[in-house]
Amino acid sequence: MHEMSLMESVREIVEDASRVHDARRVAVVRVRIGALAAVDPDALRFAFDVVMRGGCAEGARFEIELQPGAGWCWDCARSVVLSGNGTSCPDCGGHRLEVTGGTEMRVHEIELASDEEAASCA
Amino acid sequence: MCVTCGCESTARHDHHHEPALTPGARGFGVLAPATRTVSVEVDLLAKNDRFAAENRARLQADGVLALNLVSSPGSGKTTLLVRTLEALKGRRPVAVIEGDQQTSLDADRIAATGAPVMQLNTGKGCHLDAHQVGHAIEALAPLPGAVLFIENVGNLVCPAAFDLGEAHKVVFLSVTEGDDKPLKYPDMFRASRLCLVTKSDLLPYVPFDTARAIANAKSVNPALECLVLSVQSGAGFDAWLEWLEHASVGPLPRAAAMQSGVGA
């Protein structure tokens, strides 16, 4: 659903970064997505090809690095690994959990190609 | 001068670029495309979150209670809103932002109550974003101490991720939808402060277990408050008005909410 609009943010972020580094073509886009970020990786991959069309990242390789979910269990009073939203504490089975990590969605890094003939990102 | 790269060095040096020759091309002098890796580290929602922070600062400074109403289509958001606006008339200033994919039908219903309203059509978009809402706030200019209701697009998935600058999200769950919905769409229930179980007058006719629905919602978000009500019969409506009266203009720190909240 919202993977399309998220991907439009990716395009904007990637094109800004390419301009700053005076690059003509982006070869690889690497994003980090948390397990609790409410994003479907397959939908994101589909959106990448569609949204990058006509820009300097068209045809680039898209890599998703999935980050594990993490939470604090108030009953165990310690950090636990969470596989998804709505899961219980893997140790005590309780639900008094505070999500502490794994909700991120960010462009981690890009690889810039230096072929001269490609159209500029600018 | 080195004729290969044009540098001034006379010493021996190589002309490998990173990555160097690909294995398959070894001996043929064909270079793999040279790439350089650049760290970016920008959040996908950074731009939206910046606008949301501006909205929030403006609303809190004016003591405006902004509520982002979210649910699947048809859960009774507009009906409850119309009744709420009538109840608040003469007691507290209000303003309404209506989000829909198309038409101003909902805004027309709201306008009939006399409340200032602005319709936002998202077109192909599936949610309101903080930028659109910022412009609407500017145009509506809610009075100090007002309640600003932002009725989001009927969609239980996408609006969870897009902060609009509200104090709280209020998620609606109608009894015709099924008590397992909080488990099927956990993100929205996790992001919300209050869950309104609506259309309770229909309970005799549908296989909806209210206690199970609330337990499911709290398993996703132990700090979630839940109210059961019906606009048709008026049952539970006063508790909603009371909640409105005491709701904090700023978002509650999550850890504090968790500690005071009851377990699942």
Image: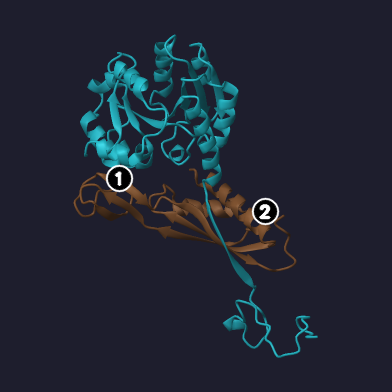
Chain colours: A brown, B cyan
Q: Taking B99 as reference, is B30 above or below it?
A: below
Residue located at (47% from left, 57% from top): A32
Residue nearest the viewer, comparing A107 with B59: B59
Q: In which image quadrant can residue B16 be found? A: bottom right
In the drawing, does residue A50 fall left or right of residue A24? left
Q: In which image quadrant can residue B103 be found? A: top right
Residue located at (38% from left, 26% from top): B75
Read off the chain for label 2: A
Q: Which residue is mark 2?
A: A54
In the drawing, does residue B5 fall left or right of residue B264? right
Query: What element does badge 2 sit on?
Result: loop
Instruction: Identify which amino acid the numbered label 2 is placed on.
Output: Gly
Q: Residue B88, how many percent across, how many down?
A: 41, 13
Whether residue B209 is visible: no
Instruction: Identify which amino acid the numbered label 1 is placed on.
Output: Gly
In the drawing, does residue A26 fall left or right of residue B52? right
Count of labels in the image: 2
Residue nearest the viewer, comparing B36 with B62: B62
